[in-house]
Structures are given as C-alpha cells and as structure tokens.
Image (tube, rainbow, N blue to C red):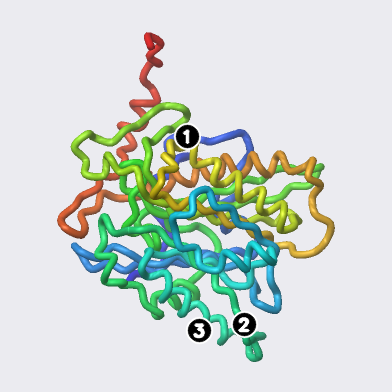
Amino acid sequence: MESQSPGTGRRARDLGLAIGRIAPGPFNAITDVPGVRVGHATVRRPPSVHSGVTAVVPGAVGPRTPLPAGVFTGNGYGKLIGTTQLAELGTLETPVLLTSTLSAFRVADALVGWMLEQPGCEEVRSLNPVVGECNDGFLSDIRARPVHAEHVRAALDGASGGPVAEGCVGAGTGTVALGFKAGIGTASRTPDVDGRRFTVGVLVQANFGGTLRVLGRTVPPKADDPAAEGETGSCMIVVATDAPLDARQLTRVARRAVFALARTGAAYSHGSGDYALAFGTRPGGAPVADTGLGPLFEAVLDGVEEAVLNSLLAAETTTGFGGRTVAAVRADRLLAVLAAPVDTSR
C-alpha cells in the first residue's frame, strides 16, 4: 500500500493550458477551499491489481455537524452509496470516499467504523456514509476486491491540505478515460460574487468514454490502443465551496459539474455513471442570491474541465490485468495537435 504524496506529474498549466478566465487558488486544487483535505491509499500488486481509495474530508463534518450538500446524476449506471438521504435532506455527514466498484461496499462499512470512533459520535445510532465508485476492471482484478478497511483508514487519517497527488493514485490508480490512462485530477477557481471572493474546488475520478477534446481540438488515442473504442465508464466529481449556498443551490452547482464533462469529449453512454456531489463548508447564514450564481457556475465548469485534463496529464502508461496496457496522453502530441492549423475544408 502506498499513501498520498504530492504529485510530480505535469498539469495543464505546466503546458500553458489555462481553462477559463477565473484565477485558480494557490494550489489549484480542491484543498484551496478552507478546511478541505484529501487523502489517498493506493493498492498495487502488479501486474493484476491497480486500485485504491481517495478521501475528500471536510473539516469537522459529522452527523451532529452536517454540511449543506447537493447531488446530481447525469446517468445513473453506478453505485453512489448514500445518495437518497443526501438528496432528501440536503446534508452531508461524512467525508466523501471514492474507490473501485466492487470495493465500494467494504469502503462504506469501513467509513462507518471510522466515523463512529470520532469525537462527538459516541451516541450516534444512524449514519449516512457517502461512497462513490468507478469500475477499474479493465486494468485491475476488480473481483479481488483489494481495498480493505486499513486502506480506508490510511486515506482518512492521512488526509491533508496543500498539493494533491493526481493521476495513478488512490481511486484513480486503475482508471481509464477518453481512451487514455487517467486517474484523479483536481483544480480550483476563486470567483467574485457580488463583491465577495469565494473558492470553488473540484476533484474528479475520471473513468469515462468518449474522445478527448482540449480547447475545442480532438485528441484521439492510437487506433490500436485496446482502450480506444471504450464508450462505457464513469466519472465521479466532488465539488467543494466556501460560498454560502443552500442544498438546492448546491444541487444546481452539481449539475454544472456533470455538464462540464461534455467539454472534454464525454460520450455519456448507456453504461456510464456520471455523478457530481457538491457541498458547502459554511453551513447556515444567508445564501448567495440565485442571480449571483453565474460566476460560481462558470468556476465549476472551468474547474472540472481542467481537473479532467490534469488527471490525464499526471497519469502514467500502465500495464495491468490480463496484460492490457493503456497509454498515457503524451504532452508533446497534445501540444502538437493544439498548434496545428485548423482544417477549414470540411
């Protein structure tokens, strides 16, 4: 098992690719939102197992101190544990964990055990764990269900602020998106709303089908790549903000997060599970007026697009279960595509 370490892979901005006009936070990560931490536990047993768990941990969240939250399902071919209560009550009462499909249920059980040990939970008799998943079975032996309680606890206990490891780490260790090796990606934006500056941070577990688009240009994988024709898959998106939004508004924010996948070339196929969960770190108080939500929506759209790109650029070519190999996107090829003249003959 490997714990989190700051990513050293390239990011979009390292290549001069800045998405949108709103400035990012200091780490360009979901951890730019005050109080939000991220932890990973990576489970590798080459060549067959490439999996793990990622934890997004808002400070002091719990059943006695829930946070306002909303969720949106673009296509529901997935297992987002805890969705019905979150949608019904509009509150989040645990960290959000991401993992592999068949490990999601073990992860949820381990999250419950960890939460019951936290201060303030001594008398808790009901708890709604929130766990999302993507199917990493193309590169990992998913039937082995390799993620266990010790991995969940390592991700939660090791969660920290600052830079976030991206690419082939945690829940993104075995994921594939848009025909390339993908993984975890993150980004942030600092929009101004009615004269007040807020932070919006996103984290994605990218594992969805389609054809990569960057700044409007198509970047297909090689035709002989075994993942090139994959249209199924999923994407889990977590959005955090310190803007004072209520659950209804956060659900609107979550919708925009799923919409943003279209910019990256997502196929939104029958077999995709496209989910976004958005939470606020400032419960209570007067929410932002609906008429002021535009900059927050823009921040989410741009942030998700950049986070997906970061998940691809930080990933590494991986050979996994059954000898399958999925190549990472090459930065030089990406830049060459972007620099090529636009074909106006069609």
Secondary structure of the residue carrying tag 2 is loop
Mark closer to the chain start, 3 or 1: 1
Instruction: Look at the picture and state if 183 lies above or below 104.
Output: above
Callout 3: few (<14), some (14-19), or many (20+) C-alpha neighbours within 10 Å? few
- The disc at residue 127 is none
Q: Are marks 3 and 2 in contact (CB under 8 Å)?
A: no
Quadrant hosting residue 161? bottom right
* Picture residue at 41% right of the left edge, 46% below the top: 270
Residue 219 image position (x, y, % from top left): 35, 31
Amino acid type, callout 2: Ser
Q: Nearer the viewer, mark 3 or mark 2?
A: 2
Q: Are marks 3 and 1 in contact (CB under 8 Å)?
A: no
Is 282 on the left-hand or right-hand side of 125? Answer: right
Residue 115 image position (x, y, % from top left): 56, 81
Q: Give the CA distance from mark 3 to mark 1.
A: 42 Å
Quadrant hosting residue 220? top left
Callout 1: few (<14), some (14-19), or many (20+) C-alpha neighbours within 10 Å? some
Residue that mark 3 sits on: 113
Instruction: Look at the picture and state if 167 lies above or below 42.
Output: above
Is 261 on the left-hand or right-hand side of 43? Answer: right
Residue at the farthest bottom position: 123
Residue that mark 2 sits on: 126
Mark closer to the chain start, 3 or 2: 3
Mark closer to the chain start, 2 or 1: 1
Residue that mark 1 sits on: 17
Secondary structure of the residue carrying tag 3 is helix
Closer to the camera in the image, 86 or 93 = 86
Quadrant hosting residue 332? top left
Is 265 on the left-hand or right-hand side of 94? Answer: left
Residue 77 image position (x, y, % from top left): 44, 55
